[in-house]
Image (cartoon, helix red, strand yellow):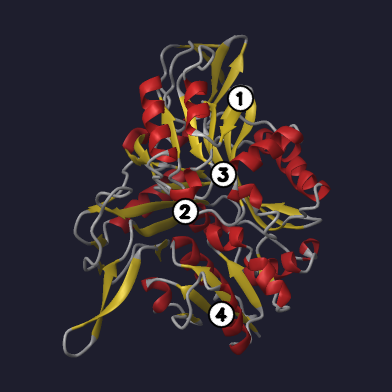
Amino acid sequence: MLRILLIGKGGREHALAWRLSKSPRVEHVYVVPGNGGTARGLPKVSNLDTVKAEDYPLLIEEAKRLEIGLVVAGTDQAVVDGIEGFCSEAHIPCFAPSKTAAQIEGSKTWAKNFMHRHNIPTAAYSSFTTHQAALEHLRTATTSYPVVIKASGLAAGKGVITAYSLSEAEAVLSSFMLDRKFGDAGAEVVIEQFLTGPEISILTFGDGATTRTLPSAQDHKPVYEDDKGPNTGGMGVISPTPAATPEVMRRIEDEILRPTFDGLKAEGREYSGMLFTGLMLTPEGPKVLEYNARFGDPETQSVLLLLDEGETNLADVLMACTQRRLHEVEIKIKEGLHACNVVVIAGGYPGSFSQGDAIEIGEVLPEDVTLFHAGTTLRKQGEDGHEQLQTAGGRIFSVAATGTSLETAVEKAYKGVECIGFANKSYRRDIGRSSSFGVMFETYGFFALRCMADCSSLYYCVPGSFGSATTYGIIFITARD
C-alpha cells in the first residue's frame, strides 16, 4: 500500500487528492497544508499541520516518519525550489522535475531563450534586468502596441499584463521593477509581441523518455466576463477545447512538445513530471505563451474528470513517471465526455478581499458535479468548538462538472455554483459559453473561421479586431464556393 505526501492547498491539490484516494493501491494521502476540502469529507485523505510546506528538510523528516512512498509537488514554489532534490537525497520517489529542469517555469527569460535555441514557436521578445533599458525599449519607434509585459519569476499567475499604449506600458513596468509589485519575481521582465487567437493549455506526463498528453483545456484568465479586467490564477476551464482539433494537436506535438522534451534532455535537464504548456493558436500556427513545471490550476480540476477510473490509476501513472516506466501504464480518456469547472472567488480578487467569511454549501450537489475546495479552511467556533467552513483566500472553489456535450457540462457546473453561499461571492458567468465558436486561421490574407460544429464548412471573415482569445466578433461572412 502507498502513502502519498501532496504539497499544496488549492483546488488543484483537492482534485489530485480526490483522484488519488480512489486508487486501491493508495493507503492514505497527506496534504500539506491542504484546505477545508482535504481536511474532511474525502476517504483516506487528511491535512498535515505539523510542518510547513516550504520547510523542505523538516518535510522530508516528516515523510520518513510517516513512511511516505511518493511525494507529489502541486505548487510552483515547491517545484522551482527543488523539492525533487530533497526527496532524491532521502531516497523518496517524487513526482516533480529536477530543479534545473524546473527553470523552464522559474524564469520566463530562461524559457524564452530556451525556445529560441530550439526553434520552438513563440512570440518575439526581449528581456531586461534594468528599468531604464526596458523603458528605452518601450519608447523606441519599432515597438508596436499592444505589448505583453511579464515578470520573469513566479507571480502566482498574475505577473502577465497586456499594455495597450506606451503610458500603460510605462506604468506596468514601474509597478514591476520599481515598486516591486511581485517582489523579486519582477526584478527581470520579458517584453514580448502581443499574439491573437484561441488560448489553450496542454498537460503532458513525462518520465525522461516517454510522454503522454492529456486532453486539451482552455482557461479563462481575466477576472471579468468577456475577458476584461486584471489577470488571475484562472477563473474556469473547459476540456477538451473545440479549438484543439486533431490537426492542431498533431502540430503541437511535432512542433512544440517533442522539441521541448528533446531540448531539455539535450541540455542535461531531462524532464520527469508534469509539463504544462500554455499556447496561443495564432493565424501562423500554435505558439508557446508559457511553461509550468507542474499540474495547472484550474485545468487539473477539469482534466482529471475525463480520466477513465476503471482503466487509469493516477497513483500508478505518477509513480511510473518517477521510475522511467510511463510506457507500461494505461492512461485512458472517457469517450465523448466534456468537463467544465467554474471558479468561485471572493469579491475583490485578485486585489484586496475579505477572509474568514462563513461558507454555506447545499446538502446535495447536482448530478455529475464535483466541488473542489481552494481558499477554504475549517475554524473552531463557540464554546463547543464546532468547526465552521470559512473563506481563506481569493479563489474559494472550483465547481466542476461533466456532460456528454460542452453545453451540458457548463450548465451543470453553473447549477453547482448556485449551491454555494458566502459574503461577496463572485464568479464569471461566461465560462465555456463562447469557446465553441471555432478557430481562427489565416487564409489568403483573411481570417477564416472554421466552425467546430461542422468542420467541413469553411467561411471567410473580413479582418478585424477579434478581441479576446475566447470570444469572436463576426464582422462579415460569406460562404466559400
Label 3 residue SS: strand
Lateral position of residue 9 relative to residue 224, left or right: right
- What is the number of the mark on residue 201? 3
Label 3 environment density (alpha carbons within 10 Å; few <14, some 14–19, many ≥20): many
Nearer to us: label 1 or label 2: 2
Label 2 environment density (alpha carbons within 10 Å; few <14, some 14–19, many ≥20): many
Would you name the residue on which mark 2 appears? 298
Q: Amino acid at mark 4?
A: Leu
Q: Amino acid at mark 1?
A: Ser
Q: CA distance from mark 1 to mark 2?
A: 32 Å
Would you name the residue on which mark 1 appears? 456
Q: Residue at x 65, y 42 (%)?
A: 110
Q: CA distance from mark 4 to mark 1?
A: 59 Å
Lateral position of residue 62 relative to residue 219, left or right: right
Would you name the residue on which mark 4 appears? 58
If you read the primary sequence from the N terminus, does the residue marked by circle 4 or circle 3 appear first? 4
- Of the 4 image quadrants, the one containing the C terminus is top right
If you read the primary sequence from the N terminus, does the residue marked by circle 3 or circle 1 appear first? 3
Where 273 sits versus 1, above or below? Answer: above
Q: Residue at x 78, y 44 (%)?
A: 263
Q: CA distance from mark 3 to mark 2?
A: 11 Å
